[in-house]
Image: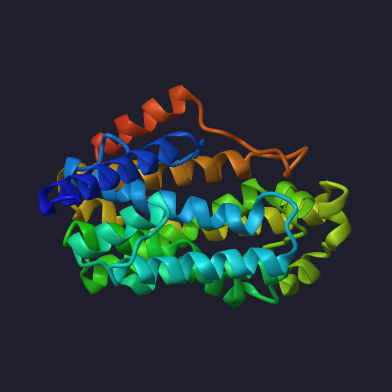
Amino acid sequence: MATAGSAGDIMSSELDAAYRHCRQLARSHYENFPVASLLLPRAVRAPVAVIYAFARTADDFADEGNLPPEERLARLESFGQGLDAALSGRPAGDPVLLATADIIRRHRLATTLFHDLLTAFRMDVTKHRYADFAEVLGYCRYSANPVGRLILRLTARASSENLSSSDAVCSGLQLVNFLQDLSQDYRENGRIYLPEDEMRRFGVNESHIRDRRTDAAMRGLFRHQVQRARELLATGAPLGARLPGRLGLEIRAIIAGGLQTADKLAALDEDVFARPRLSTADRLGLLWHAWRRPPYPSPTGA
């Protein structure tokens, strides 16, 4: 029979392994924006990696493989139930859920923010068109904004002003990601995140995306979306100046990365469906500019 001490050792070992699993998962995926980077304060790097692992795992349930929608939704539902079970003290059975329950308890995070992320992944399964920009922003409210809010809560910086700025930054980054993945989202999952009313206004239809057709109409719509993403990033950019130390530096680097990627998207002319990536030189430049605290563009670009 295991003693209380040995049971505690087993639990500690299992939890350590769960955190290692989350760190490895965070490091194994390419992103244009830093994930649990060395810029972050040491105390929050591990929980940020866990948040990423939670989102990445759920995203794979929604997107990967050839499962029917019903099975994808069932897996997402089971994942959410597993988190609630782990929080109630029952065995998690999944290292990501074990680590997620631990950071929620340790840092007094809102469980609802993790369930918001799961709502977004369910939307990925069931909703492939968006009537207008309000619907797109509604998706961002579940898919992107919870991550920024969790980081602010981890660092005890979740004032109403900071939360509002974070939502603008996260939604802007989500829009940039949509524009990078226009062709891939349609080809792999049949999704179009461009507002349907704006597609009609610019004279763009689904065949533009299906055939990767870049003409004057598509360029006009695309640039309109890029400008909107830039405006959201600029609206939230003062957050990077308000946050202190390494956290502020990280946020400024993320915002600068989003703005630079938007610049690369805006420069696309022959093929708006190309996917620009930030080079090593780009990333070093972002760190330099973030360190110098550059002035941010106004939301209107003035």
**Figure label count:** 0
Q: Is residue 259 left or right of residue 251?
A: right
Q: Nearer the viewer, residue 64 or 41?
A: 64
Quarter of the figure with residue 170: bottom left
Q: Residue at x 69, y 54 (%)?
A: 222
Q: Is residue 31 left or right of residue 204?
A: left
Which of the colour schemes (rainbow, by chain, secondary structure, one colour) is used? rainbow
Q: Picture coordinates of residue 53 (x, y %)?
A: 42, 49
Q: Picture coordinates of residue 245 (x, y %)?
A: 15, 44
Q: Would you place residue 180 above or below residue 218 in this image?
A: above
**Quadrant placement of the C terminus:** bottom left
Q: Is residue 214 left or right of residue 247?
A: right
Q: Residue at x 70, y 76 (%)?
A: 131
The answer to whether any part of residue 113 appears in the image is no
Q: Residue at x 29, y 38 (%)?
A: 290
Q: Nearer the viewer, residue 137 or 88?
A: 88
The answer to whether any part of residue 22 appears in the image is yes
Quarter of the figure with residue 43: top left
